[in-house]
Image (cartoon, helix red, strand yellow):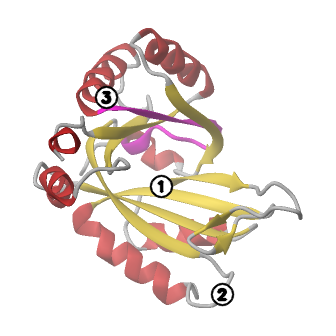
Amino acid sequence: MSEMRSMPRTALLTLILSIPDAKKCIAIARKEGAQNMLVMRGKGTVSSRHLHLFGITSQDRAIVNILMENTAAEALLDTLTDQLHLHKPNHGIAYMAQVSTMGKCPAAQEEGKSKGEDNAMFKKLTIVVNLGMADDIMDIARAAGARGGTILHGRGTGAAYTEKLFGIAIEPEKEWIVILVPTAMADRVIAALEEAHDFESPGNGILFVEDVSDVRGVVVE
């Protein structure tokens, strides 16, 4: 039991970058010892008048996910912020979320919550809908105050085996929308999405929310 309590906390570091900057990010992360990385392609949805906030246009974007021990992830985030100029407008965004590792005891989970997750300044909204609905979802979110998001395409592995996320089949023709909003705005955006879209009907989509911390590249007005 004492070993479980002493296990290092793990963080998921996510960066949304241009393709060239994503390549630099991966090289830097590897040099700093990162081993668990997942890179996905998506497109930004922020309109030109909001470039100063997210630095994301309609161009292709890379979403780099790095799983590391918490202290190492914090140090890597500082390094990436400096070398990729994330402290300046229009250079992308980055944020961290705490991960509950397998085998962690409830006491350790509560310890993690006490160190900032409950007071997170931002929420990450993830929405999975059928192909062609992402733009409508983003219009609803923007009308509620969100500045933009990133659209990804989810695919299963064929008819013989269908991947599932919380009971929803992730087959070809699914779109994922990731929206980062200030915590104070999250309830309003979520309520607008739930009112406009029927998430209750089976197979019609899902919406879930995560706390994120240590956000870089986002300016709150």
Which mark is nearer the camera, 1 or 2?
2
Asked if the residue at tag 2 contacts the one at tag 1, i.e. Cβ–Cβ closer than 8 Å, the answer is no
Residue type of the residue flagged with mark 1: Gly
Give the image location of residue 52, x and y in percent. Answer: 39, 39
Cα separation, mark 2 vs mark 3, equals 37 Å
Q: Quadrant of residue 22?
A: top right
Q: Which residue is mark 1?
A: 148
**Horizontally, is 23 left or right of 13 in the view?**
right
Q: Which mark is residue 127?
A: none
Q: Earlier in the sequence, mark 2 or mark 3?
A: 3
Q: Which residue is mark 3?
A: 73
Element on which disc 2 rests = loop
Element on which disc 1 rests = loop
Cα separation, mark 1 vs mark 3, equals 25 Å
Q: Which residue is mark 2?
A: 202
Q: Quadrant of residue 185?
A: bottom left
**Horizontally, is 87 left or right of 146 in the view?**
left
Please say if 145 is above or below 85.
below
Task: Estimate how packed mark 1 is, as few (under 14), some (14 to 19) or many (20 or more) residues with alpha carbons within 10 Å.
Answer: many
Of 221 and 188, the residue lying toward us: 188
